[in-house]
């Protein structure tokens, strides 16, 4: 048990793997041992996990892997509001949009859960829910971030709201998905795509095994001699199985090839389709009407199987993260109770945020999110608009002011009235900006695609020419040779090289705590010349924390911090939040907060003041001949004094994230142009820029302005990368050539980003560079090998030295080589 | 070797059953999450070591 007077710096939170703030002494007991926690949210989640005997979770998760949780038990006081927010799911009438009954009579719901990053997270949820009751069945889909819950009615009445409460106690944020969305959502589409691919691979694999077995029989028959009837039988059976495989599993290739040809675009699928058709149809002719000696069903089927596997890998790499519309809706509560005038009466309605009408009334308490754009009718509150503007300091709002949807009440109560309908609200405006940004991503045909088109065309022409030549020379071998050429030329290894390299790189990055949503950026990263950073929450942690303490009397730093924490424990002011994670055993009585100046109170019988130095000095009536250390422009300071003496100067700031300096110097060393684009005040941005030695620093920027700045750079032929976290960065993600978001920020921004940094450190940008470099090198090796193989093998096939089965075998081994080479990425990263 | 006239159709029927079984599994969503079931195996091993009275706590 660590002593209470420990001063420990820079540890890692056991639960979420972020660094703990200085002076924080929050601990949680997991498996009998005390572990450091970074905040009360993590502590609550860890204690819950331990209490449910689920601490195996910490054993199994990847050590440096992605595990940032969105602990919804934030601070000591928001839990009741959170606990009751899902009660509407227990009510028959209000839950029909989200819950339904399946054929077994179970109540079912689909949840969108944020914070799910690795398989141990899904294990945790499954175990925790199954421990509540055996009547609950859970299915977790990591990639789609979806959890399906089915509750058996007969076996016991478990409230659905309890299920969501449990999920939230673990540190995740669940949101019920409405049934309509379920059927049209992108996630469902992806699910179906995944299922279809698996079915096709299954059929192709099973069919391949059958046909290969028959082929062994046929080959042996050619060596040893076989009765014609039995030979015919085997041939026909091969044809039967091959037909099923070709037309079911091979269908996507044919359809894509037809589409490509009708668009006059010679994609990879064209030669593939030609090869499959070229193996299958002549073999059918030969089996039915010919001698049955020249059948190639085995090649066709094997071909399809390996190609499908390659496509599947590619598809999985594509399907990494969830789509935007869900993330946008998750910002707001699913349902709210508003009061609406009906005639002259006020009637309460329970509605969804997008059903809001102008003049709907709502009362919002501390901790709630504003669900629609509104005018303030009464009350007073401090608002956290950080997701929208990036400002960390709360903004005071009162009657007559206006609010934007998405801002959060830090303290106070407001009575508000909706000022516009959903379609005119700021959320919809953000959505429009998002779409704009995405449209900017031009679908330029990469050099690679153009090359492959030329390659394909050349090969087809070549095959045709060689075919004609052999027809004239020795027509009995025409078919065999043309087929061998088509198979040998098939750019299977070539097509596999890129997705396989991308998958290996994604996996290596995942272990480093970096999620790759868009593997294209591996290629683009080295050509980025300009890097833009958001300030609050990106370069910094986004929250005020204790920087350092200068003791001015005999009291130690810890004792001063203890007293200060006790004094500030009730305050919601932004500076007081620096103390929120300091656990102190002291209690302060008679606390009086003087707005804008400080706080005073009685601790252990003594009276103390904490706040602006001018105010404190006046309060304690001390003479001015006390020398205090100079102001520090980078921090906010608070002076702690008792009635007789000044005790300490406490410096509080929004600290830089670990790794920020490292990342900045790394990029500067490579000659990249760096800028800070922030919604915060220009002075604050300038100060930060100076401390990091970044020349370009722009403050007070709205999302549109950030987008414009980047567009200007792009017009000047620069490739721009943007690193951001807040909601105000979401549209900018689409504009930049490479976009990077932090997992601790807005979920919407993450869904738009190409890369997500999970463990909260910009230092990972360095790993990203190295891994991207490595993967590019290996992918280039693979591409050159694949090409070389085709170039060597084609002439051999053309000259008649290669029979189709040899060509198919060669193609498979070449693909295998490509995959093995890509695995080197993993081993190299580990070292 | 006339037995293959019996065995091969039989194996094809078996294949059909296998394919049907696989399709049913895919449709019931068993292939949707291929990562976490791997951890469940380890879990059984560890919980055997723990105090059995721990299980089923509310």
Image (cartoon, coloured by chain):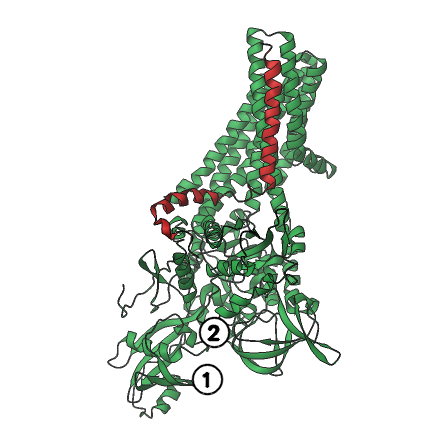
Chain colours: A green, B red
Within the image, what quadrant is residue A47 found in? bottom left
- Kindly tell me whether residue A89 is visible in this rendering: yes
Q: Residue at x 60, y 20 (%)?
A: B10
Estimate the x, y position of residue A198 in percent, counting from the top left.
Answer: 58, 37
Disc marking residue A596:
1
Name the residue carrying label 2. Answer: A684
Q: Give the side of residue A577 with respect to residue A27, left or right.
A: right
Q: Give the side of residue A827 with respect to residue A312, left or right.
A: left
- Kindly tell me whether residue A201 is visible in this rendering: no
Residue that lies at the very extreme toward the right in this rendered image: A343
- The chain ID associated with circle 2 is A
Quadrant of the frame with the N terminus of chain A:
bottom left
Residue that lies at the very extreme toward the left in this rendered image: A554
Estimate the x, y position of residue A164 in percent, counting from the top left.
Answer: 53, 59
Q: Is residue A783 above or below residue A794?
A: below
Q: Is residue A803 above or below residue A606?
A: above
Q: Is residue A249 above or below residue A324?
A: above
Quadrant of the frame with the C terminus of chain A:
top left
């Amino acid at each position: 048990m660590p002593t209470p007077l420990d001063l420990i710096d820079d540890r890692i939170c056991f639960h979420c793997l972020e660094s703990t703030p200085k002076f924080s002494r929050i601990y949680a007991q997991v498996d009998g041992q005390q572990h450091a926690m970074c905040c009360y949210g993590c502590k609550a989640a860890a204690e819950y996990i331990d209490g449910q005997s689920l601490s195996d979770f910490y054993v199994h998760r990847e050590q440096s892997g992605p595990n940032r949780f969105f602990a919804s038990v934030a601070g000591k006081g928001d839990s009741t509001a959170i606990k009751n927010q899902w009660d509407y799911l227990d009510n028959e009438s209000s839950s029909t949009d989200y819950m339904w009954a399946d054929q077994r009579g179970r109540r079912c719901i689909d949840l969108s859960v944020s914070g799910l990053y690795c398989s141990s997270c899904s294990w945790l949820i499954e175990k925790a829910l199954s421990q509540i009751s055996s009547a609950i069945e859970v299915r977790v889909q990591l990639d789609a971030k979806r959890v399906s819950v089915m509750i058996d009615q007969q076996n016991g009445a478990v409230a659905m709201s309890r299920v969501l409460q449990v999920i939230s106690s673990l540190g995740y944020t669940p949101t019920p998905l409405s049934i309509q969305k379920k059927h049209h959502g992108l996630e469902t589409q992806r699910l179906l795509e995944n299922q279809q691919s698996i079915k096709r691979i299954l059929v192709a694999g099973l069919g391949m095994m059958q046909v290969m077995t028959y082929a062994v029989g046929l080959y042996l028959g050619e060596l040893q001699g076989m009765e014609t009837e039995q030979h015919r039988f085997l041939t026909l059976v091969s044809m039967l199985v091959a037909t099923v495989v070709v037309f079911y599993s091979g269908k996507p290739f044919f359809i894509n090839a037809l589409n490509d040809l009708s668009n006059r675009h010679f994609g990879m699928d064209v030669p593939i389709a030609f090869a499959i058709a070229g193996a299958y149809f002549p073999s059918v002719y030969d089996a039915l009407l010919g001698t049955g000696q020249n059948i190639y069903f085995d090649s066709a089927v094997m071909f399809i199987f390996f190609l499908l596997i390659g496509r599947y890998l590619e598809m999985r790499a594509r399907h990494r993260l969830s789509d935007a519309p869900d993330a946008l809706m998750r910002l707001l509560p699913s349902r709210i109770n508003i009061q609406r005038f009906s005639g002259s009466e006020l009637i309460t309605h329970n509605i969804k945020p997008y059903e809001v009408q102008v003049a709907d009334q709502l009362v919002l308490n501390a901790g709630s999110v504003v669900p629609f754009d509104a005018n303030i009718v009464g009350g007073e509150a401090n608002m956290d608009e950080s997701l929208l503007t990036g400002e960390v300091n709360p903004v005071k709002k009162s009657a007559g002011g206006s609010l934007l949807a998405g801002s959060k009440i830090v303290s106070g109560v407001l009575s508000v009235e909706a000022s516009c309908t959903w379609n005119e609200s700021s959320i919809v405006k953000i959505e429009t900006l998002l779409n704009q940004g995405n449209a900017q991503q031009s679908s330029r045909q990469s050099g690679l695609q153009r090359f492959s088109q030329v390659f394909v065309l050349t090969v087809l022409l070549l095959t045709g020419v060689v075919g004609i030549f052999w027809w004239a020379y020795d027509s009995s071998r025409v078919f065999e040779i043309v087929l061998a050429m088509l198979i040998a030329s098939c750019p299977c290894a070539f097509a596999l090289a890129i997705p396989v390299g991308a998958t290996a790189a994604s996996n290596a990055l995942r272990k480093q705590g970096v999620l790759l949503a868009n593997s294209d950026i591996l290629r683009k990263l080295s050509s980025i010349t300009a890097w833009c950073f958001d300030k609050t929450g990106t370069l910094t942690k986004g929250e005020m924390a204790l920087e350092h303490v200068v003791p001015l009397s005999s009291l130690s730093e810890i004792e001063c911090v203890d007293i200060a924490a006790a004094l500030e424990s009730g305050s919601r002011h932004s500076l007081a939040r620096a103390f929120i994670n300091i656990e102190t055993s002291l209690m302060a009585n008679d606390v009086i907060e003087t707005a804008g100046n400080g706080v005073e109170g009685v601790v252990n019988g003594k009276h103390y003041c904490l706040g602006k130095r001018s105010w404190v000095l006046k309060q304690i009536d001390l003479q001015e001949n006390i020398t205090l250390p100079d102001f520090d422009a980078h921090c906010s300071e608070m002076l702690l004094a008792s009635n007789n003496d000044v005790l300490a100067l406490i410096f509080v700031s929004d600290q830089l994230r670990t790794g920020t300096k490292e990342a900045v110097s790394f990029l500067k060393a490579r000659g990249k142009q760096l800028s800070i684009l922030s919604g915060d005040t220009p002075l604050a941005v300038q100060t930060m820029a100076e401390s990091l030695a970044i020349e370009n620093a722009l403050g007070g920027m709205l999302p549109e302005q950030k987008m414009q700045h980047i567009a200007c750079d792009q017009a000047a032929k620069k490739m721009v990368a943007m690193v951001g976290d807040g909601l105000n960065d979401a549209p900018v993600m689409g504009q930049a050539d490479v976009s990077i978001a932090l997992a601790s920020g807005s979920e919407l921004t993450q869904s738009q980003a190409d890369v997500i940094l999970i463990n909260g450190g910009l230092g990972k940008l360095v790993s990203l560079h190295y891994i991207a470099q490595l993967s590019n090198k290996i992918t280039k090796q693979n591409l050159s090998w694949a090409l070389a193989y085709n170039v060597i093998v084609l002439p051999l096939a053309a000259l008649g030295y290669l029979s189709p089965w040899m060509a198919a075998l060669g193609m498979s081994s070449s693909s295998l080589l490509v995959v093995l080479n890509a695995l080197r990425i993993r081993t190299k990263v580990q070292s | 070797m006339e037995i293959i006239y019996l065995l091969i159709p039989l194996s094809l029927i078996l294949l059909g059953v296998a394919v049907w079984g696989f399709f049913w599994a895919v449709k019931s969503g068993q292939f949707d999450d291929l990562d976490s079931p791997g951890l469940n195996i380890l879990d059984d091993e560890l919980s055997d070591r723990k105090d059995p009275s721990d299980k089923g706590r509310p």
